[in-house]
Image (cartoon, rainbow, N blue to C red):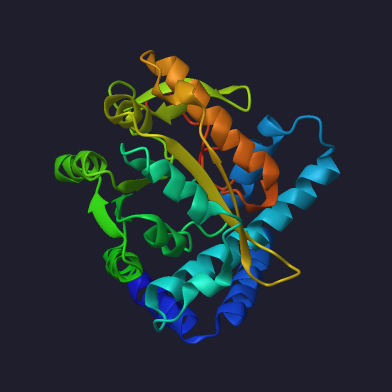
Amino acid sequence: MRERLLKLLLNAFARLPFAWTGRLGALAGRVLYRVGRREVDNARVNLALCFPDMSDAQREALVRHNLIETGRSLAQMAKLWGGNERDWLAQIDDNGFIAAGRVLVERGNGVIFALPHIGNWELIAYPLIEIVATTALYRPPRMAALDDLMRAGRAASGVTPVPTDRQGLKALHAALQRGEGIVILPDQVPKQAGASGVVAPFFGHPAMTMTLISRLARRHGAPVLFACAVPDPVTGRHRMMHFEGDPAIADSVPEVAAAALNRDVERCVRAFPAHYQWTYRRFEIPGDKATSPYRRR
């Protein structure tokens, strides 16, 4: 029943105009702020850790703003996945992103596009394919209905989605060897420490951090290009922020590389704190729930 209701809601989003979808998603975010428990609690904990100099009132206002913007972005992502084909590139002010990406491609080692959970990261697929053929690492959601919709939507953009398994990793290596682009969300939390993740500082606090980007960058000599896209209230379009990542991301010491990766993610977050996915339990170390700052539910 839950999956059927979710599918109906996503199909409804897909049929609405892009701006209307955003407004409806923002309304859902306002409701979630009022009635949500786990998500709101997570956001409060994260913001208290990351912005201790803010007053309680400032942080609470940011929590509310964040839930609204999260709802807006998620609803508009659903529109991208299931809506009719259109010129989505027209919804973006790439702010020089396409040109910067092409310069990095010319180096001949491929490009790793690092897209943190900020704003509408799905929309960035459309300028990506203007730069180079791109393969995106894809972690399937728990709900099968959502999985089908997301994969179809991503494939429609021209980006090739691959799963987070051995075959998917082979596809990433092959793409970089061909001088193409790959997409990874750099702030996804690995399920365990070891080859896939190490603990590194994020906003000054220990956080499990992926090592995949660092390993790929080091092996292939590929530059890392960070990017995010958030709505511009003046133009109504999404404006991109982008920059080349710290070379230390390719350091041979995993903890040094992970710390550099987190610093660049933090740079993006500080630019747009209301648009980050603060509802995510970023500071929970897998296998160490005793030290988790989050409330058990």
Q: Establish if 235 lies above or below 242.
A: below
Quadrant location of the N terminus in the rendered image: bottom left
Residue at x 46%, y 61% (from the top left corner) = 127
Q: Quadrant of residue 268?
A: top right
Foreground pick, 244 / 273: 244
Give the percent coordinates (x, y) of residue 112.
Answer: 38, 41
Give the percent coordinates (x, y) of residue 38.
Answer: 56, 49
Q: Is residue 62 left or right of residue 284?
A: right
Residue at x 61%, y 81% (from the top left corner) = 20
Whether residue 2 is visible here, answered yes or no, is yes
Foreground pick, 32 / 88: 88
Give the percent coordinates (x, y) of residue 293.
Answer: 58, 30
Residue at x 31%, y 26% (from the top left corner) = 215
Q: Is residue 199 left or right of residue 36?
A: left
Q: Is residue 202 left or right of residue 123?
A: right
Q: Quadrant of residue 160?
A: bottom left
